[in-house]
Amino acid sequence: MFKLTKVIAQNASALSGISKNARLLSTAAVRYSSSTATTNSPSANAIDSNPDEPIQISNPFEKERKVCILCKHNITPDYKNVKLLSQFQSPYTGRIYGRHITGLCKQKQEDVEKAIRRAQHCALMPTYHKDLEFLKDPKLFDPEKPIRPHKY
Ligand SMILES: [Zn+2]
């Protein structure tokens, strides 16, 4: 085996890259007889086009960027939009749900709280319960499953 590879390597160096086959053979020879053959400059070019080398791909583990529900639909909370605002209010106590439950971004959460306070001040929204009219509205989030745990 070693003899054969040596011969191939010598032949390849003698031809010095005239034919493609000789080049491929010489690289193969260099790979298999790493201890014996320490020659050949033409093999360096062939190694560049190695199919075993890693290829560039996008990160498959990259996380999706989270966008809150109001930013997603480009909604600015308004104190007159009571139907929307009451969805951020507890039906039992009228408490405004925190950001860990609503999943809003900081800016939108502030806007929602401000709008709810303003609506309550204008007597458009109740303070200690959710308006009965909106009790059967679809839920934007599940208060039982907050993003991070809470004590109440
Ligand atoms: Zn947002």
Image (cartoon, rainbow, N blue to C red):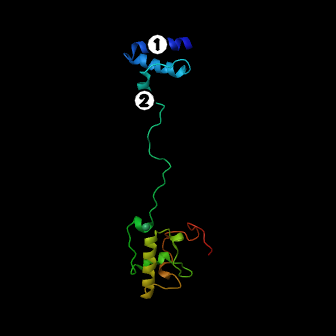
- Say if 141 sits above or below 42 in the image: below
19 or 10: nearer the viewer: 10
Q: Quadrant of residue 123?
A: bottom left
Residue 74, above or below 28: below
Q: Amino acid at mark 2?
A: Asp
Mark 2 and mark 1: Cα distance apart in space? 21 Å
Q: Quadrant of the N terminus?
A: top right
Q: Is residue 120 in view from this perspective?
A: yes
Residue 85, position in %: x, y? 45, 77
Of 8 and 119, the residue lying toward us: 8
In this picture, is 142 found above or below 7?
below
Q: Residue at x 50, y 49 (%)?
A: 61
Q: Residues within 10 Å of mark 1 (few under 14, many from 20)?
A: some
Residue 56 lies, with reference to residue 148, above or below; the image says above
Q: Which residue is mark 2?
A: 48
Q: Quadrant of ligand 1?
A: bottom left
Q: Secondary structure at mark 2?
A: helix
User: What is the quadrant of residue 145 in the picture?
Assistant: bottom right
Location of the C terminus (image quadrant)? bottom right
Q: Secondary structure at mark 1?
A: helix
Residue placed at 43% from the left, 71% from the top? Answer: 107
Q: Residues within 10 Å of mark 2 (few under 14, many from 20)?
A: few
Find residue 8 and report its horizontal and vertical position in percent. Answer: 48, 13
67 on left or right of 142: left
Residue labelled with disc 1: 10
Amino acid at circle 1: Gln
Label located before the other in sequence (2 or 1): 1
Between residues 141 and 36, which one lies in front from this camera angle? 36
